[in-house]
Amino acid sequence: MMRTFLISLILIAAVPVKAEIQAVDIYSVKQLSQLIHQDRYLQQVKHDDCQLVEDIEARAEVLKEPLYQFLWGEMLLTGTCVPQDSRRGMTQLTASANQGSNEALFRLARYYDEGDRVIENNETAVKYALPAASGGYIPAQMLLVKLLNEGYGSPFDYEQSYKLLYHNVFDDKVSKDKAEKLLKRLATKMPASIVKRAQKRR
């Protein structure tokens, strides 16, 4: 009897106890914005064990919150925590852009610039990059100047695009150096007087 009892205790001790999954609160707009700017939004959703899928979908599809439309669209496009549905994902991303989300505008510009998930169309990339750049979104400003340097877009946008990027404050030296190279190339397409005017403080 004692032997049977001891064997039972050993067997019970050998069974692994699964750790409880901690409940995760939905991200605030500020938190989500930071995750997007750090390009960690999809990793975070997976890190949270995909617990927030229904909340994210509701905020995107029902409440139509722009940043959540962006996140939900990217989850659908990449198959993160949900079955991949590229058409539906692109619809959500476009809806976010139509509400003025700089993040979504920039993402669409990148998709069209790289020909990722859509047919490459650099003029369409410029169309999406322009409003995001004007909204102060540095990655969009970088992309816009790159596209202008490559001959896309209109020369009428040179001065404003130069000015937007030139007068920014950058988080790191790598970004600043990249901006300087892009601006130096764009300056060769503009009269010196226009470049000088663009460099003046707003």
Image (cartoon, rainbow, N blue to C red):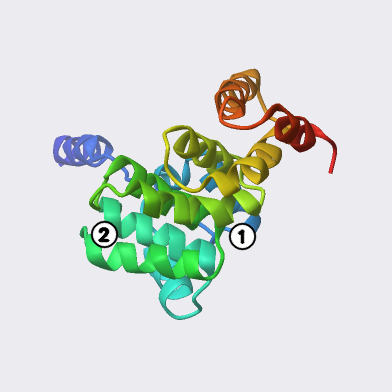
Instruction: Give the alpha-carbon distance from disc 1 to disc 2, as whole Å.
Output: 21 Å
Numbered label attached to residue 82: 2
Q: Nearer the viewer, residue 98 or 134?
A: 134
User: Residue at (62%, 32%) from the top-left corner?
Assistant: 190
* Mark sitting earlier along the chain (1/2): 1
Q: Quadrant of residue 164?
A: top right
Quarter of the image with the N terminus in it = top left
Crowding near the residue tagged with mark 2, few <14, some 14–19, many ≥20 C-alpha atoms within 10 Å? few
Numbered label attached to residue 28: 1
Say above or below: 167 vs 96.
above
For this view, does 4 lie left or right of residue 131? left
Q: Position of residue 115 (x, y in %)?
A: 27, 44
Say above or below: 85 vs 175.
below
Q: Is residue 62 in sight in this rendering? A: yes
Q: Nearer the viewer, residue 18 or 26?
A: 26
Amino acid type, residue under disc 1 in the picture: Ser
